[in-house]
Amino acid sequence: MTKIVALLSQKGGVGKSTLARALAREAANSGLDVKVADLDTQQGTFVDWHRQRLDNGHPRIGSVETYAKASEALKAGEGFDLLVIDGAARASKATLEIARSADLTVLPSCASRDDLIPAVKLANELVQGGIDRNRMAFALCRVTTDAETADARDFLESAGFRVLAGALVEKPAYRQAQNEGLAVTETRYKTLNQKADELLTDLTNLLLTE
């Protein structure tokens, strides 16, 4: 049976596609048959990144396509071990539909209140729409210090939501890796790869409990 992970956000630039890429890469690398559905038809950042990955001679990450409708993406994922849905960089009517179908919904956020408050608002809207809090988790991305990370974690947990272990720090090496079609677990720096892997491991463990 296909496991479905949806990465959703209220706005762009919070690390949604970054996490989707890393999750898909790690899953494919472990031998899973992966389908990635990029729902951002205007930008198609995942599809463009995967094309760059292949052009640079890096291993394919399953099947990667863009879909205009959530229903099409969900149908296309049938038969795969894992369907990774990289949602559009905005909430829409389809957001709730996706979350209802997902085994796990991940909401990435940066540490500023400008990012955290809209993210919590979206999470509360999903809860009001019937999504179980236990099938949702926040992921902190583009943080700069341990203190900033701790503050953001406290803010989200005080709002009643789970926050994945670890965080993606703001590092040029992560951007450079993605520019080359690599995931944040594939940088030239072992420590950065380990930091990214900590977050992804917790995400994967949570998914397997669903």
Image: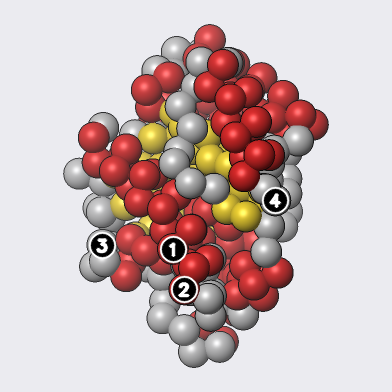
Q: Which of marks 1 and 3 is in front?
A: 1
Q: Which residue, given by chain and number where applicable, does mark 2 sit on?
A: 190
Seen in the picture, residue 161 relative to 62 is either above or below; the reply is above
Q: Position of residue 2 (x, y in %)?
A: 26, 46
Secondary structure type for disc 1:
helix
Whichever of callouts 1 and 3 sits on the residue coming sooner in the sequence is 3
Q: Is residue 197 visible?
A: yes
Toward the top, the furthest residue is 128
Disc sitting over residue 32 in the figure: 3
Question: Badge 4: few (under 14), some or many (20 or more) residues near its Cα, within 10 Å?
Answer: some
Asked which secondary structure carries label 3, the reply is loop
Q: Looking at the image, what colour scheme do you see? A: secondary structure
Q: Mark 1 points at which residue?
A: 194
Which of the two marks, 3 or 4, is nearer to us in this view? 4
Q: What residue type is labelled 2?
A: Lys
Return the residue found at the far left.
1
Q: Distance between the residues labelled 3 and 2?
A: 24 Å
Q: Are marks 1 and 2 in contact (CB under 8 Å)?
A: yes
Q: Mark 4 points at which residue?
A: 144
The residues tagged by marks 1 and 4 sit, at their Cα atoms, a distance apart of: 16 Å
